[in-house]
C-alpha cells in the first residue's frame, strides 16, 4: 500500500509541474538554445537582462542577423512569450539617424530566442556612436532598455547609401553569400528607401543587375550570373552569383526601377572598368 501511495504522489507531482510550466511566461531553459551563437553584450534595466547574440559575437557595418534573449533578474528564468520592438540610433556630432531594421520575431523551434536583422550603414568612430533601444512587452507590461553598442567598420564595401537622379535616397546592403565559394552561389541583397532620418522602407519590384569582375586578373567576369529580383514584397532581392576562382571580386551593379529605367550604376566596358554601384568580397 505504501508503494502505491508513493507512486500516486509522484505522478501527481509530475502533473502539477507540467501544468504549471505551461502557464508560465518564463522558464529556466538550458543555455544550449544559444548553441552556435556568441554573446555580443547585455542590456539591463531594473527587471531584466536583455542578451544580444550573433554568430560571431560582434556587430559590423552592413548586414547583421541578431538574436535576443530576455532573462528575469529575480528568478534567472528566460522569457518565453514577449513582444519585442527595437530602434537603432546613430548619434552623430550634428544629428541623429536610424537604419534599416526588420521586425523581431520568435526564432523557429526555440522557446526563449527572438531574432531579426539590422543594417548599419556606417561604423562608430571616436565622436559618433550607435545606441540600441529595445521596447518589449511581457504579460501586458511594457519595459524599455537602451545602451550604446559597438559597430565596427567592415573591411570590404558591403553597404552603400546613394541618391538617384530624382534625389531619392536609397540604401543597398550585401547579405549573401556569407561564405562565398568557387561555384554559382545563391545571392541576396537588401534594398531600402530612406523616407526620413528615422524611417527606411523596403523597395519593391525593382531589379539589380550584377556583373562580378576580378580587377587584379584583367577585370575578367564570370558566366551564369542571374540578376537579383524579389519573390515577395518586402523581401530581399535574390539571384545567382558566379565566382570562378578565389580572390578579390568587385560585384558591379545597376539598379533598375519597375519600368526598367536605370536609377544608379553603369555597365562595365573596356573604357569603364567599374560601376559606381558595387560591393566587394574576398575569399
Image (spheres, rainbow, N blue to C red):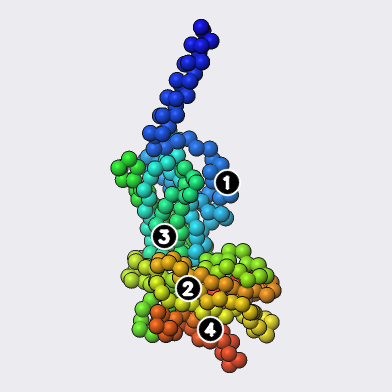
Is the residue 231 above or below the residue 48 in the image? below
- Where residue 20 appears, as percent x and y from the top left, is 40, 29
Which class describes the residues within 10 Å of circle 3: few (<14), some (14-19), or many (20+)?
some
Q: Which residue is mark 4?
A: 275
Q: Is residue 229 left or right of residue 165?
A: right
Residue 281 lies, with reference to residue 45, above or below; the image says below
Q: Residues within 10 Å of mark 2 (few under 14, many from 20)?
A: some
Cα distance in 3D space between marks 2 and 4? 19 Å
Q: Are marks 1 and 4 in contact (CB under 8 Å)?
A: no
Residue 127 visible, this orientation: no
Of badges 3 and 2, nearer the viewer stands 2
SS type, badge 2: strand
Q: Quadrant of the C terminus?
A: bottom right
Q: Position of residue 52 (x, y in %)?
A: 48, 50
Which badge, 2 or 4, comes first in the chain's sequence? 2
Res. 279 in view? yes
Q: CA distance from mark 2 to mark 1?
A: 33 Å
Task: Identify the residue position indicated by label 1 in the image.
Answer: 35
Q: Earlier in the sequence, mark 3 or mark 2?
A: 3
User: Can you give x and y, in whole percent of width and height, for residue 273 in the image?
Assistant: 59, 87
Amino acid at each position: 500500500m505504501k508503494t502505491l501511495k508513493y507512486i500516486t504522489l509522484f505522478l501527481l507531482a509530475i502533473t502539477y509541474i507540467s501544468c504549471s510550466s505551461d502557464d508560465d511566461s518564463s522558464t529556466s531553459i538550458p543555455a544550449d538554445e544559444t548553441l552556435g551563437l556568441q554573446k555580443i553584450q547585455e542590456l539591463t534595466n531594473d527587471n531584466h537582462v536583455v542578451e544580444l547574440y550573433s554568430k560571431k559575437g560582434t556587430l559590423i557595418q552592413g548586414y547583421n542577423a541578431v538574436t535576443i534573449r530576455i532573462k528575469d533578474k529575480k528568478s534567472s528564468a528566460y522569457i518565453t512569450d514577449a513582444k519585442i520592438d527595437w530602434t537603432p540610433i546613430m548619434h552623430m556630432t550634428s544629428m541623429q539617424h536610424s537604419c534599416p531594421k526588420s521586425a523581431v520575431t520568435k526564432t523557429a523551434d526555440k522557446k526563449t530566442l527572438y531574432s531579426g536583422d539590422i543594417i548599419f550603414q556606417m561604423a562608430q568612430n571616436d565622436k559618433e556612436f550607435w545606441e540600441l533601444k529595445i521596447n518589449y512587452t511581457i504579460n501586458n507590461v511594457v519595459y524599455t532598455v537602451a545602451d550604446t553598442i559597438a559597430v565596427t567598420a567592415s573591411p570590404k564595401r558591403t553597404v552603400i547609401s546613394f541618391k538617384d537622379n530624382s534625389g531619392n535616397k536609397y540604401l543597398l546592403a550585401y547579405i549573401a553569400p556569407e561564405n562565398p565559394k568557387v561555384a554559382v552561389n545563391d545571392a541576396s541583397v537588401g534594398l531600402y528607401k530612406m523616407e526620413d532620418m528615422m524611417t527606411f522602407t523596403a523597395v519593391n519590384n525593382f531589379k539589380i543587375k550584377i556583373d562580378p569582375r576580378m580587377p587584379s586578373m584583367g577585370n575578367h567576369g564570370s558566366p551564369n550570373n542571374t540578376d537579383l529580383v524579389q519573390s515577395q514584397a518586402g523581401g530581399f532581392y535574390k539571384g545567382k552569383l558566379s565566382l570562378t576562382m578565389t580572390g578579390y571580386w568587385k560585384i558591379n551593379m545597376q539598379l533598375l526601377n519597375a519600368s526598367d529605367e536605370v536609377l544608379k550604376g553603369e555597365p562595365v566596358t573596356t573604357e569603364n572598368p567599374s560601376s559606381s554601384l558595387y560591393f566587394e568580397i574576398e575569399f
